[in-house]
Image (spheres, rainbow, N blue to C red):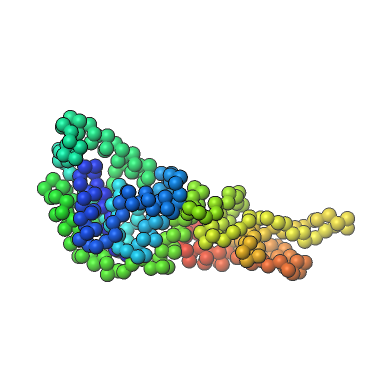
C-alpha cells in the first residue's frame, strides 16, 4: 500500500493540505469524521478509550489499505505506524501570527479572541497526542517532510507532497496483501483484546485468569478468528486409590466447542514434558473418545511467529 500521513499544528491548514493531496494522488482520504463513523460501525457506540485508540485505528486502516492507497489526516498520524518503505509522513507548521490570522478568518474573531482560542486548540492538541501516543508533540525523526505554511498555501503544499510520493514511487509497491493484513490485524486485535474490545455484533471476549502468558496469546488468537473456547473446563481422572478416590487427574488448557477438541499448551523445555506426556498418554487410553491436541514449545512458537508476534513471554 501507499500510505501518506499528514498532521500539523492547529490552524496551520494541514487538513486542507490533506484534502488537496488526496485529490491529486487519487488516494482514499481518512479524516477524523470518517474514522469516527468507521469506529462505530466496527466497534459499536461505546467510545474507544484513549489507550486503545491506536490499535483500533490501525485495525480499520489495515482493512481499507487492502483496497485503496491512503492519505491519513489525523492528529498524530505520523505515530500510527513504524517506518516502512510504503510510508511517507508529513507535518505542517506555521508561525503563530499566521495561525492566529487563520483563526480570525475562520471564526470571524478579533485578534485577542483568536489568540485565546488558538491557545486552547494548542492545549487540546497536545493533550490528545499525549493520551493517544504518549507524547504531546511529534518527534523530528517521526516526520519525513515538514512543510512551513508561512509562504505556501494548501494547494502548493499538496503539490509538494504529490511530487514526494511520486519520487518515492509509493503506489508501485501495490496494495496491502492479504497475508500482511492478517498479521497486522492479529497484532492489533491482540492489543484490543487486552482492553476487552471486539468488533460490534460479535461475542464478547472471555475474561480468564491464565496460568501462563502463552495461554493468553493463544486465547487471543482464538478470539481473533471467533473460535469459541473454554479455559480449563474439565479435569479428567487418571488414577484412583483402592477406595475409588481420584489420586491423579489432568486438566487440558482449552476446549474448542466448534471442533470438539481439547488443546494443551506445553511451552516448557522439552526435557520437562515427560510427566505431562505420560498423563496425556493415560488420558487417551482411558478416554479414547476424547480428542486432544498438544502444542509443544516449538509448535507454539512457530504459530506465534507466523502471525508476527514476539515470543519473549514464552
Residue 131 in sight from this viewpoint = yes
Residue drawn at the location 54% of the way across and 60% of the way down? 226
Tell me residue 203's x, y (percent). Answer: 55, 54
Residue 81: which quarter of the image?
Answer: bottom left
State the quadrant of the N terminus: bottom left
Horizontal arrangement in the rendering, residue 221 relative to residue 117 (left or right): right
Tell me residue 60's x, y (percent). Answer: 39, 56
Residue drawn at the location 18% of the way across and 62% of the way down? 163
Tell me residue 52's x, y (percent). Answer: 43, 48
Depth order, front residue of 212/10: 10
Residue 143 in sight from this viewpoint = no
Q: From the viewer's perspective, is residue 2 above or below residue 99?
A: below
Horizontal arrangement in the rendering, residue 273 relative to residue 285 (left or right): left
Residue farthest along the left direction in this orientation: 151
State the quadrant of the C terminus: bottom right
Tell me residue 134's x, y (percent). Answer: 37, 44
Depth order, front residue of 66/6: 66
Residue drawn at the location 24% of the way across and 49% of the way down? 15
Horizontal arrangement in the rendering, residue 254 relative to residue 83 (left or right): right
Residue 157: which quarter of the image?
Answer: bottom left
Amino acid at each position: 500500500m501507499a500510505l501518506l500521513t499528514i498532521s500539523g499544528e492547529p490552524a496551520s491548514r494541514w487538513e486542507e493540505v490533506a484534502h488537496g493531496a488526496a485529490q491529486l494522488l487519487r488516494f482514499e482520504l481518512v479524516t477524523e469524521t470518517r474514522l469516527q463513523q468507521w469506529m462505530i460501525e466496527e466497534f459499536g457506540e461505546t467510545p474507544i478509550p484513549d489507550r486503545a485508540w491506536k490499535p483500533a485505528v490501525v485495525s480499520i486502516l489495515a482493512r481499507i489499505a487492502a483496497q485503496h492507497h491512503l492519505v491519513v489526516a489525523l492528529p498524530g498520524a505520523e505515530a500510527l505506524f513504524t517506518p516502512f518503505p510504503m510510508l511517507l509522513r508529513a507535518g505542517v507548521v506555521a508561525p503563530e501570527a499566521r495561525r492566529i490570522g487563520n483563526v480570525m478568518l475562520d471564526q470571524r474573531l478579533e485578534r485577542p479572541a483568536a489568540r485565546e482560542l488558538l491557545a486552547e486548540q494548542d492545549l487540546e492538541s497536545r493533550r490528545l497526542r499525549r493520551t493517544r501516543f504518549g507524547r504531546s508533540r511529534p518527534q523530528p525523526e517521526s516526520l519525513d517532510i515538514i512543510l512551513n505554511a508561512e509562504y505556501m498555501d494548501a494547494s502548493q503544499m499538496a503539490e509538494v507532497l504529490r511530487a514526494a510520493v511520486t519520487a518515492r514511487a509509493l503506489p508501485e509497491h501495490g496494495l496491502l496483501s492479504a497475508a500482511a493484513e492478517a498479521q497486522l490485524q492479529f497484532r492489533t486485535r491482540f492489543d484490543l483484546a487486552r482492553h476487552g474490545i471486539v468488533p460490534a455484533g460479535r461475542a464478547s471476549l472471555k475474561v480468564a485468569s491464565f496460568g501462563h502468558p502463552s495461554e493468553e496469546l493463544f486465547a487471543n488468537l482464538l478470539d481473533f478468528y471467533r473460535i469459541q473456547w473454554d479455559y480449563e473446563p474439565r479435569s479428567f481422572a487418571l488414577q484412583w486409590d483402592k477406595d475409588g478416590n481420584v489420586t491423579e487427574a489432568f486438566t487440558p488448557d482449552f476446549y474448542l466447542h466448534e471442533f470438539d477438541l481439547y488443546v494443551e499448551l506445553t511451552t516448557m523445555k522439552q526435557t520437562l514434558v515427560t510427566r505431562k506426556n505420560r498423563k496425556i498418554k493415560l488420558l487417551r487410553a482411558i478416554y479414547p473418545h476424547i480428542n486432544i491436541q498438544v502444542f509443544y514449545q516449538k509448535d507454539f512458537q512457530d504459530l506465534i511467529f507466523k502471525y508476527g508476534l514476539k515470543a519473549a513471554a514464552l
